[in-house]
Image (cartoon, rainbow, N blue to C red):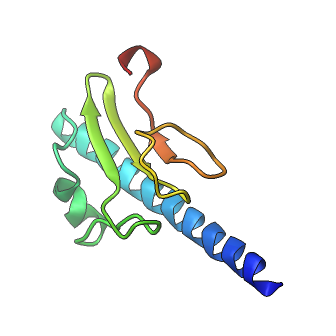
Amino acid sequence: MLLPALTRAIESQARTEAQFDLMQIGLSVEQYHAQNGTYPTTLDAIAPSIGGAVPVDPFTGQPYHYQLSSGGFLLYSVGANGVDDRGTQDYRKGDIVWRGVPKNEQ
């Protein structure tokens, strides 16, 4: 009886952590862009500005997904389902996206 509630609480905490991490990383990437005129090729370039290490996705323990595109960048967590939906936002179970690629680039 308590297990489903505990599972939901853990998932909610991981979602909140991922959203905070993505916000922190995304803002640091934007700051890097403002200072250098380009987006970093990897998230390692912003590590010093966020305490020396880039946080990892709480759902997988792996790095967050970061990809450059002609219009900016894509930054996301795989979310609760643990499946890489390639940055497709789905609040309940799918990817948690900081910034998506514009539809005309997909």
Q: Nearer the viewer, residue 2 or 43?
A: 2
In the rendered image, the quadrant that contains the C terminus is: top left
Question: Residue 74: x percent and y percent?
Answer: 36, 38
Question: Residue 22: x percent and y percent?
Answer: 44, 55
Taking the spot 36% from the left edge, 18% from the top edge, the residue there is 105
Q: Nearer the viewer, residue 30 or 10?
A: 10
In the rendered image, the quadrant that contains the N terminus is: bottom right
Residue 49 left/right relative to 61: left
Looking at the image, which residue sits at the far top? 104
**On screen, residue 36 above or below 21:** above
Q: Nearer the viewer, residue 90 or 66?
A: 90
Location of residue 48 (image quadrant): bottom left
Residue 22 left/right relative to 40: right
**On screen, residue 89 above or below 27:** above
Taking the spot 19% from the left edge, 32% from the top edge, the residue there is 37
Looking at the image, which residue sits at the far right? 1
Location of residue 52 (image quadrant): bottom left
Looking at the image, which residue sits at the far bottom? 2
Taking the spot 60% from the left edge, 43% from the top edge, the residue there is 90
Residue 89 left/right relative to 48: right
Q: How many marks?
A: 0
Location of residue 10 (image quadrant): bottom right
Question: Residue 8: x percent and y percent?
Answer: 70, 71
